[in-house]
Image (spheres, rainbow, N blue to C red):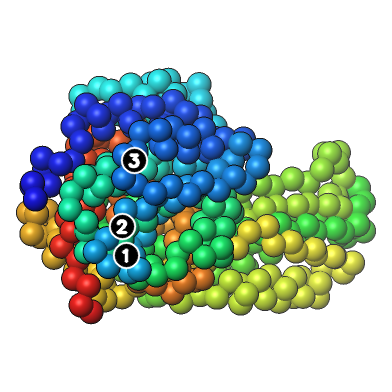
Amino acid sequence: MRKNKETIPSAESALAILQQLIRIRTNHTEGYEMDAVKYISSILPHKTELSIIDHGNNRGSMIVEVKGRIPDKKIAIFSYLDTVKNIGINRWEHPPFSADYVNGVVHGKGAANMKGGVTSAILAMMTLSKTSPPPLSVLACFTADGTGDGLGAIEITEKGYLKGVVEAIFTNATKEKIGISQKGALWTKVEVTGTTSYSASPSSGTNAVEALILFCQHLRKAVVGQKNRKHLLLGLPSCTITQFNSGEGEVNQIPPYAVATIDIRFMPYQDPESIISLHNEIAGELSKTYDGINVKIEVLKIQNSVYIPENSTMVKRFSNTLLSMNKKSVLTGLNIFGDAAHVIPRTGVPFLIYGPGEYSSAINEKVSLKSVISVANVLVKYIQSYDTNF
């Protein structure tokens, strides 16, 4: 067998794939992942087996398989195709869909989150399909709606495509660190109604804005908790007000209505149902403080937190692979959304998160081409050296 570095597609090929993926607009608001699915299917070798899932409205996911020497034992690589919503498009230093390549770095919408990871998975599958069969079969799952509600990951999981999968790798941007934990997400909408009066006589009304502010303060304190519970990789949970509105009242009028949306990122040791219960408990306390107040709570989104112990067999094996390639083995945690939150609770398989680039903003995304290729090499090495006798 030829060495891995000789079988990974050239840097020119890797660049062309990444640039084309960035130019295919898969904005989360519109979807259009099927356009990316069609492109990927057109460049993969015939030796791979493809299964395409049509979600409707030009949204699609795809499973690519390379058969291994033990065909019924499989490892799955997950990479989502959609990008976050368009934010601050006019403030980009490089046009977001131009995929400019400057000094070894590719700039563009989704470069880090996560078309760099998609490209790494494609390069790995191209390589594995050209060498002798790997020890076990490999599935590359390219999914729709990874930045949203996990449409692709859920359908792939629940419709049996992952039968025989014993491990999963998610190519989210980790800056080539091994991700072993990811915060969960709980989004809620809180509406408070009171009674109005003129502000010259504030005691005659019930101020919905003041009540909602107090609600949010109590909720944040309850969710974040004590600083001594800080997680080594994830830090502290967070509770952030993302929207706040009190209607169109007058300056001299007690506001009878206020609404806020809240983004909570919780830890592996926290239960989202318990946090929802906290909302209700705080609402009950508010009703005692403010006469005539009414609080309505709506859950907008729940995404699970996932975690794997750092001394697990998979993490140790992956770490050894990196060390054998003279690469650093560093653990990390993630705050952002991803398919792991949908796949792992449904399957329970060992997993880790490992990908190129660092996602820190929806503006001026970029990824190093060298990192994209490096991750592909690591995936190939890990799979080709996989010990099936465990």
- Residue found 91% across the figure and 57% down from its top: 195
**Looking at this view, is 187 or 121 the one in front?**
121
Q: Residue at x 42, y 38 (%)?
A: 41
Asked whether 248 or 206 is in front, the reply is 248
Task: Determine which residue is flagged by label 3.
Answer: 46
Which residue corresponds to the image point at 52% horizontal and 65% vertical from the top-left?
A: 160
Residue 233 lies in quadrant: bottom left
For residue 321, above or below residue 95: below
Q: Residues within 10 Å of mark 2 (few under 14, many from 20)?
A: many
Residue receiving disc 1: 71
Amino acid carrying label 3: it is His
Q: Which mark is residue 67?
A: 2
> In the rendered structure, which disc, 1 or 3, sits on the residue that comes first in sequence?
3
Residue 3 drawn above or below residue 321: above
**Residue in front for this viewpoint, 45 or 293:** 45
**Contact between labelled residues 1 and 2, with CB atoms less than 8 Å apart:** yes
For the residues labelled 1 and 3, the Cα–Cα distance comes to: 18 Å
**Image location (x, y in percent) of residue 121:** 32, 46
x%, y% of residue 143? 49, 48
